[in-house]
Each structure stands twice: as structure tokens, then as C-alpha cells.
Amino acid sequence: MVQGNIGTCFLLGAIGAMAAREDGAIEKMFLRYDVDIGVFGVRLNVNGEWAYVIVDDYMPVDEAGELLYGKCRDPQEVWVPVLEKAFCKMHTCYEMCDGGMPNEAITGFLGGVGGKFVIKNVHKRSPERYFKLLKQAKSKGWLMTTGFTARGGGASAGKCGEAVLPTGLVAGHAYSILKVVEAHGNMLVCCMNPWGSGEWTGKWSDANAFGEWTPEMREAVGAALKDDGKFWMSIQDFVVNSTGVDYARTFGANWKKCTHHTHFQEHPLTATAQFDYEARSDKEVSFQKGDQIQVERFLSSWWTGAVRGKHGCFPGNYISLNARSVARFDLVCTKAERIQEDMTAVVMVIQPNALMERRWYTREDGSHYKDTAYPFIQLVIADPEGRVSLKKEARKRCVWGELKLPGGGLWKIFALASDGKGSRFSLRVFLKGGTGSLREVQSSNVAEFANLL
């Protein structure tokens, strides 16, 4: 694969991760096609639902007639530009896909849910712990991509304005993770640059400057050491240079799915102060009894919000939430017979993709920028005994978590956009090891939500 003159490295990185699988994921996306006529039917996944798009073989070209955007290194192959065109058409046009998130691209091809393995300080102290995380994800069939950060100076400009670093890595660029291998005491990660060139130049690179690539190591990991955009890194170098790993988790035929579409309440969550409180640091806010507080985070003992325009944190037991409806769903599950393991549920709240919407905001200097921010949403799930089994919150497109459901029963799912900026959303539940039904409960109040916490 070779990236063209558009910022679709996130898309090509995802395609590279799919091509590295051995289950024919790329082939399965082409439902029907005729190369001679030039028409292709491609299966995609939009907001968790399967859809298809039909595209022809008319592609953008430059003055010399060369493909302007993504292409295959072999000029006789057309699957890369066709997939790129199909994805862009499904999301309106090429312009709307000039930049994006790799896990969005993977889930857009294969469905499922995405996330990120953040590199923490503990991983930098013990890189083998992060390697174990990647190894487990790879063994489960999760698709992964990564990016790298600029360290120090000496960077030059890349194809779409990215920073090409002295190490050969490119900051602001998406790479496929093809392999995660441990051999002869070495923990290595194999990555691929969608440009088809430009590789890591440190230890375990093609240069073999340290003599690290012994014949035994090359045979053990299958390293070709060609100038083809593929390269190997030790996990120690990876955690120092990587910005983290985006992943997409897909669900096979042994998972059942329930989905409900609805809307968040379109006004913010507010509360009334029950006592006076004096801030003890710059991060806190003061208020007096009776003050109205706009609440943002409230899933722990210390809440955050704004009082008279000042934002900060405060103890949650000093205030009382005002009446407000909240989205609630009842998930009733029945465990399958003759299955020893507990039922598993993956629950997710999915908002529309902000990158694909034409929303704008104005900065203080008068410049206009695309608004890609998401509302702040909370997801809380209570088990049949009324105990909180999962609570998540984030300003992201998708907030999700996994549960074990030992005996099935009725599980209450609450979803809330506390800043009042949420609009439509989908609640989706994947179930394994049993069956379930999902029902929205009307007129549920936030007080029921708060009492669980």
C-alpha cells in the first residue's frame, strides 16, 4: 500500500492491520464486483450496523494520470483505492476523511468497538507489561494501529504535513501493527508504514547496526528486512516512542446483539447546594447553600462542575441533584443451557461521528475551525441486586465496558450526557453464552441514577 496526497493514513493503517489477518478479512468486504466493467460492491459497518456501498473505478488522478490518493504498490491491484473510495463515499466524500481515528476506520470495516491502550508510566518502567497487553489483544484477533511522538528537534515535513523524525518515524501518522512476537528472550513489535517506505532506523531496524538480527532471530520472527515500510522495534523502544495503541475488538457469530436508538436530554445536569462549602485549593470551587451548580463529573465522591462561571471540583455529599429525566434500559438475560462459563455482555453507548459532521466554532482570534468535540457522557450499570457493576465516563464517541452475568436476570443500564450537549445515540449490547432483551424505561429520574452511586 502507498498513501497518496490526502490524510488517510488512519484508514490505510487500518486496512494494513486487516490485511495482516489470516481470515480473508479484505476479501470478505467485496460482496460482488466486476473488474472489467469497473463496479464494486463493498460491505461496510456504519454505527455498528452492516451496510454496503457501490463504487466505480473512476479515481482522482494528477496531471500525469497517476492516482492522486491511496494505491497499491503493484499497479495491477486496485483493492486499496477501491476500499478508500468506498469508505469516503459512505462518509460523504474524500474531504470528510482527510484525517481521522484508526479504530474508527477498523470498526467501519469490521464492526465491533474500539479503544486505546494508553502507555502509562508503569509501562515505561516495565515494558514487558505493555508487551503482554499487546500480545493478549493480538491473540484474541483484535486489530491494532499506533502512532509515534516527536522527541527532540530535526524533524522534516512528510506527505501530508507530518513530522518525519531523525529516527525514521513519522509523528502524526498512523501505522499498522502486524505482529507481536517474543523469540530468544526478545520482545518485538512489527509495524508497517502505509506509505510503503520510511522505517524505524534504531535497533532491530533493517540496518542491523548492532548485529541483533542473527539467522535464528530472522527465522523465528519471519523478518524479511526489506525497504517496504515494514519494520521491527523492541518493546523498550516502542513504549518510549509510541503514542499508544488504538485497537478494534470485533464480534463473531457466537455473539448476539441488541440495539436501541434514542436521544439524550438536551439540557445540562444541575444541582442545588445543601450546605456552604469553602474551596481549599485552586482546583476547588466555593458555594453557598442554595446555589445552583452545573454538574459534569459525578461518578466518584468528588464531583466537578461550574458555580457562577468558575469551574472546579467539590465534595458530592454537599449538593443534591435537581430532578431530570435520564435514559434507562432494562437488559433481561437468560443463560444458555449446558454452558459452564458465565454469560458475557459488552455494553456500549455510541454517538454520531463528530469528524463526519460539518460543525464549526470560532476561536478568540476570529479563525474558524471544525468542531470535533463530543458531549460528556456517563454509562452506569446495576446488577439484579442493585449494586453498581460498571461505571464509565468520557468525552468520546463511544463509551463501553464488559460485564460477566453469572445468572442472567435484570440489569439496569443508565446513560446520560451531563453537559446537555448530547443528541441522538445508540445503546448496543453484545451477548455471549445466552440470550437477552433490551427495553427502554420511560420517565426514569436522575435521582435513581444518583442513589446507585
Image: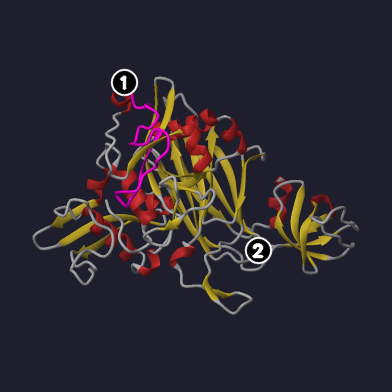
The amino acid type, in three-letter code, at marker 2 is Asp
| Residue 124 point in image, percent of width and height | 57, 35
Q: Residue at x 55, y 40 (%)?
A: 119
Residue reaching furthest to the bottom: 366
Name the residue: 54% across, 34% down: 405
* Snapshot quadrant of residue 248: top left
* Magenta residue check for 48: no
Range of magenta residues:
189-215
Taking the image as drawn, is residue 406 in sight? Answer: no
Q: Residue at x 31, y 20 (%)?
A: 216
Q: Residues within 10 Å of mark 1 (few under 14, many from 20)?
A: few
Residue bearing mark 1: 216
Q: Residue 213: say if magenta.
A: yes
Residue in the foreground of this view, choosing between 215 and 342: 215
Q: Is residue 37 left or right of residue 72?
A: left
Residue 419 disc label: 2
The x, y position of residue 372, in whole percent, is 52, 65
Gap between marks 1 and 2, in whole Å? 57 Å
User: Of marks 1 and 2, which one's residue comes earlier in the chain?
Assistant: 1
Question: For the residue marked with disc 1, what is the amino acid?
Answer: Glu
Secondary element at image label 2: loop
Q: Is residue 124 left or right of residue 48?
A: right
Q: Is 288 above or below relative to 2? A: below
